[in-house]
Amino acid sequence: MIVDDNETIVELISDILSLEGFEVVECTSGFQCLDGLDDTVDLILLDITMPGMDGWEVADKVRNLNPRLKTKILLFSALQESEVPVDPDDDLIVGYFKKPFKPETMIRRIKEAVDQ
């Protein structure tokens, strides 16, 4: 699942991941993400800075929605990596990558996250 308020980014990531054989659900808001989330979603690529409900709020709601969900979150944003506190012991948020990104870097981070 890709969640970003920038529709162009969502479409770009979706195209790249589809070519890599991933099944993709596109969302342009945190609300849309929560509405579409079910136990078939393995990974959420989640932008941190979005209007309405930011990525941190979405992550908190996912965490509280159903503790048994095996869904993982990989954050992304234009923020520097040092500005994004990712707890290595967190079972939900498994990493971060910075925009702009190279497709191969994003794919590598996604595969690492899914394999965790």
Image: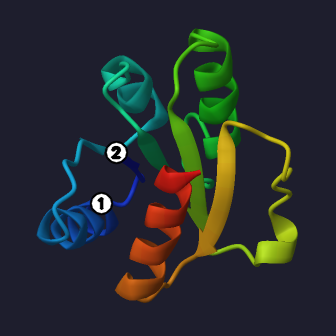
Res 68 → quadrant: top right
What kind of residue is marked 1?
Val
The residue lying at 48 percent from left, 34 percent from top is 30
Q: How crowded is the residue under tag 2: few (<14 C-alpha within 10 Å), some, or many (20+)?
A: some
| Residue 77, horizontal then vertical, whole percent | 60, 67
Disc 1 is placed on an element classified as: helix
Residue 105's label in the rendered image is: none
Nearer-the-camera pick, 6 or 109: 109
Colouring of the image: rainbow
Disc 2 is placed on an element classified as: loop
Res 74 → quadrant: bottom right
The residue lying at 44 percent from left, 64 percent from top is 111
| Residue 84, horizontal then vertical, whole percent | 80, 62
- Marks 1 and 2 close (CB-CB < 8 Å): yes
Can you say whether 96 is above or below 46 in the image?
A: below
| Residue 97, horizontal then vertical, whole percent | 60, 72
Can you say whether 30 is above or below 98 in the image?
A: above
The residue lying at 46 percent from left, 44 percent from top is 44
What residue did someone put label 1 on? 10
Res 33 → quadrant: top left
| Residue 81, horizontal then vertical, whole percent | 77, 75
Q: CA distance from mark 1 to mark 2?
A: 7 Å
Nearer-the-camera pick, 62 or 104: 104
What kind of residue is marked 2?
Thr
Left or right: where 72 falls relative to 20: right
The residue lying at 24 percent from left, 65 percent from top is 17
Q: How crowded is the residue under tag 1: few (<14 C-alpha within 10 Å), some, or many (20+)?
A: many
What residue did someone put label 2 on? 28
The answer to whether residue 26 is seen in the rendering is yes
Left or right: where 33 falls relative to 25: right
N-terminal-most mark, 1 or 2: 1
**Which image quarter is the N terminus in?**
top left
